[in-house]
Image (spheres, coloured by chain):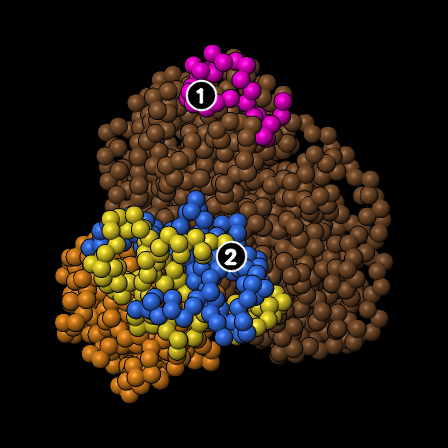
Chain colours: A orange, B brown, C yellow, D blue
Amino acid sequence: MTARIGVVTFPGSLDDRDTQRAIRVAGAEPVALWHKDKDLKQVDAVVLCGGFSYGDYLRAGAIARFSPVMDTVIDQAKAGLPVLGICNGFQILTEAHLLPGGMLGNDHLHFICRDQKLRVENAGTAWTSDYTAGQEIHIPLKNMDGRYVADRRTLDELEAEGRVAFRYVDFNPNGSLNDIAGITNAAGNVVGLMPHPEHAVEPLIGTGRTDGLPFFTSILKKLVNA
Amino acid sequence: MSRTPLDTVEHAAETPDVELPWAELGLKKDEYERVVEILGRRPTGAELAMYSVMWSEHCSYKSSKVHLRQFGEKAPESDAMLVGIGENAGVVDVGQGYAVTFKVESHNHPSYVEPYQGAATGVGGIVRDIIAMGARPVAVVDPLRFGAADHPDTKRVLPGVVAGIGGYGNCLGLPNIGGEVVFDACYQGNPLVNAGAIGVMRHEDIHLAKASGAGNKVILYGARTGGDGIGGASILASETFDDAKPSKRPAVQVGDPFQEKLLIECTLEAFQEKLVVGIQDLGAAGLSCATSELASNGSGGMRVTLDDVPLRDSTLSPEEILMSESQERMCAVVEPGKVDRFLEICEKWDVIATVIGEVTDGDRLEIYWHGGKIVDVDPRTVAHEGPVYERPYARPSWQDELQADDANKLPRPQTSDELKDQVLKLVGSPNQASKQWITQQYDHFVQGNTVLAQPEDSGMIRVDEETGLGVAIATDGNGRYAKLDPYTGAQLALAEAYRNVATTGAKPLAVSDCLNFGSPEDPAVMWQFAEAVRGLADGCLQLGTPVTGGNVSLYNQTGEAAIHPTPVVAVLGVIDDVARRTPVAFQEEGQLLYLLGDTREEFGGSAWSQVIHDHLGGLPPKVDLDRERLLGEILISASRDGMIDSAHDLSDGGLVQAVVESALLGGKGARLVVPDGLDAFTFLFSESAGRAVVAVPRSEEVRFNDMCGARGLPATRIGVVDGDAVEVQGEFTLPLTELREAHEATIPGLLA
Amino acid sequence: MARVVVDVMLKPEILDPQGQAVQRALPRLGFEGISDVRQGKRFELEVDGPVDDAALARIHDLAESFLANTVIEDFTVKVESADVVAEASK
Amino acid sequence: MARVVVDVMLKPEILDPQGQAVQRALPRLGFEGISDVRQGKRFELEVDGPVDDAALARIHDLAESFLANTVIEDFTVKVESADVVAEASK
Ligand SMILES: Nc1ncnc2c1ncn2[C@@H]1O[C@H](COP(=O)(O)OP(=O)(O)O)[C@@H](O)[C@H]1O
Ligand SMILES: [Mg+2]
């Protein structure tokens, strides 16, 4: 038995097929979910993938957050469903207030695409258990609105509770506060990050590294062992 | 004339003496007379609108057509060609049942006026051409030319253009895998924004722009039609033709990449369910073009009710609707029984779709508005039988003088220090410097199939996950070479793109081009154009790579001053297994560096002559296309058989530029020895064509040498991958840190 | 029909690189004497029917829940009266 | 110190994908009765010294040459007086 992991397609989603591929490469079964359906097809976990949902025209993720599928995702995430938000998915999670803080335009005002070095700060979430805390990895990053901001209190809380899951190393590509690349909710089932692990699962493709695969093997193990 | 009575066909027939503003719409007197002759009466306003846009230079290729014919006449035999010139884009067979379509187009002028939107809609337009062939777009490329790097206006134009290309392409989810950035004062008022796209499909999915089958419905879908890019049509829309008040209609269109992304997905879904008989994108000339081309390529006629076109601006006149260049629209021909399903798919993707007409069994294109027939034409006369000009051309009087001003006679560096200094200047000059500041604004990774992207010699995309089948593309063009000799310059562009593809291990298959020139009304420019086309057509014949399509952009000039003739050539290649691709970066210390090809004293048009002497004169490097072909075969075999671990073609900047790039990318230096028979200066800076530098693992040296020897390709051992500097023995040593600073700081310094 | 304008600006404590980029460019363009620039968004809503208190309250809700992300942004809602329009247009 | 506001909006005849995206989302959010939405930019400039006609003229130039691209955008310049600010703030 393997795990069924849903990947939501919003209008403007771009990395839905890549994310499905990454899930397959990890050995799980990808399930396509559609933004107009409230039904999650009984998946064991959900990935909100990268892209420009609704063109990101108002704010990244702001319109997608109000889609029917998100009503269910929000309810079930609060009840413990593992949810990973990658890039636009992360932005949707903050807009939906499943994760604190917000995402703004990169401080240099340009889109940036690069092979980014990160440190895994929290290997205790549903999506990071196949890493070790402190491990440094390279994951492609590509975004326009990757600057994580939150008020001082929220930042202090995130830091104190170990909820900064990933931090940029050597170079902060967007002006994120505290070099934050990704965070988790208190329960550890909802994780969001800007870099794209689904683009780092095959040795030949992209930057040629597979540092992103553990995201998908982590959740698979958790679900299969559960 | 009062416009109160609708200018129907009937009305036109009854009022033969009405004067129409044909000149304001850009038609010449004899062209207008030809329209009257074709119709046997004066045209209606709507007909005039259609003929004027479709017979424009941009749509009819009236100045270039007589020359472009050579691409067909001289086309090499090629089994790969599935769809040739004349369709939205050419299609080539890449094996395993896959077909690839690709094309390059220009969006030069709009990008000067509004850099962001001009460039963005350029990407949007070329991508719709790809979708219209039935393919899923898989990558884009962007050959760009700007004015002087340090000119203040470049700081306005370049960041906007780059943000626009990125903003649109990134939002569509298309990896940007290659292009060019060239600075030259000649492009100051006429930057060149060319954009190319590649799409992949199965053979059976190829679609063509034709409307056949009487009774089939014509469906317009995508964005609503607004007053974008209407230009002259507003004259027709004004109350009286003579009170042609300044147009309120924008000359620049704003793109909506999100809408286009939806268009891609819903079109592909409709293709998948086999719902589409014929399809055409709406680009230049909008509905005028789409309806007349669909109808003239099909078997029957077409009837369209313009009132059914969804509008963004309800005040538009029928002429304006016909000419509108609103972006993100497509036109499909669908059998009646499949219309409901087609509309359902559009609705699923929140795309507006409307039946606006149907295919008839006649041979006329008829368009109705408010119940009256405002267009009744033979669509072929609109789409295909536009004027053809034999424009006079003549070798410019200054050409001899320019060629006599020999770059080989320029003062050369006298000491090792001077040589070293010039190397640093070269690798840090705007044209040779790293373009990372630009290319990192583009998504390279989206779709998860990018094998190679910037700054590799060509971009490479995996087509099939199981077999590893892939395609590669490179675009090149050197306006300086072409200025010195347009025939040779065009062949050098072809040769370089071909070489770039082969260097990555892919077999070059086919060519697309974007020919950017000044005014065709200047015989000197027309000569440059004629020579470049002749050179490209001859070159493609010799290399066995047919031209599958392309684009011509004329009138790139400010006053009397034309840009350098700039033929940009895109070469598409195929590789059986992307695992065999050859990267640019040095991989391992100790590997042996071989220079393939012959090095001559060739400095005309070179980067060295530009950077060090601000000079343009003499002759460009010689072209030997048989040698290019041989070099390509060796590079492909060597990659397939694992004899080389990295390779970089030599082009502008010569050997030293290539070695520095491979070293910086791999983070490994090189020790070079000047080969016998060459001086250090020529060795480092010459731009002789047909060359590449490869890194050979020691274990493969014998086998590699044998192969080159047997095939008759000169291969000279010039050094070894080693250390953290580039050292030219007996001359100088340049640490990678210093080279990196010189190479990478320039562009951010100018633009950030 | 009336126009209601919603202005959305980043909260003052949040870095506004777009505004800063404008400000940094000013001296190059020969403009002195502007000590700060902030860039935000302006939404013009054309409202059918009367813009009474109830309508404004609803637009306020819309701004709060959708047009602005109040974690990072502040907003204001105002009815654009005819004379303001006249005064403001260039 | 005074605040001058420059509002930049796409010309009415130009497609505004951002405004459209907002408008299309409204019914889903349960908002009816808004027939059109346009989205533009708002620049808040803090001006040192008096905002006299000369200063306004210069800001007008700035808006025309830099803040807006008048090929596709219109702009308005206005001085935000203290009472307008008070009325407008939420
Ligand atoms: N505008 C651009 N967009 C994408 N890639 C670019 C652009 N300009 C340059 N590149 C990439 O940078 C690399 C170096 O460019 P160039 O020096 O022109 O290559 P070459 O000399 O091999 O043709 C290539 O990979 C090229 O595709
Ligand atoms: Mg190259």
Dividing the image into 4 quarters, which one contains the N terminus of chain A?
bottom left
Q: Which residues are magenta?
A: B1-29
Q: Position of residue A174 (x, y in %)?
A: 44, 72
Whether residue B491 is situated above or below residue C55 in the rendered picture: above
Q: Position of residue B565 (x, y in %)?
A: 68, 45
The residue that disc 1 covers is B7
Callout 2 amino acid? Ala
Q: Quadrant for residue B161, please give it.
A: bottom right
The residue that disc 2 covers is D68
Q: Nearer the viewer, residue B364 or B532?
A: B364
Whether residue B9 is situated above or below residue B689 in the rendered picture: above
Q: Position of residue B605 (x, y in %)?
A: 74, 54
Disc 2 is attached to a residue of which chain? D
Check disc 1 and report its element: helix, strand or loop.
loop
Q: Nearer the viewer, residue B218 or B494?
A: B218
Callout 1 amino acid? Asp
* Disc 2 residue lies near ligand 1 with CB under 8 A: no
Is residue B3 covered in magenta? yes
Q: Quadrant for residue B514, please give it.
A: top right
State the CA–CA distance, disc 1 to disc 2: 39 Å
Going by the image, does B251 lie left or right of D33?
right
Is residue A131 covered in magenta? no
Residue at 30 percent of width and 69 percent of height: D90
Residue at 29 percent of width and 81 percent of height: A154
* Residue A105 in view: yes
Marker disc for residue B698: none
Q: Nearer the viewer, residue B123 or B43?
A: B43
Residue at 69 percent of width and 77 percent of height: B734
* Residue B261 in view: no
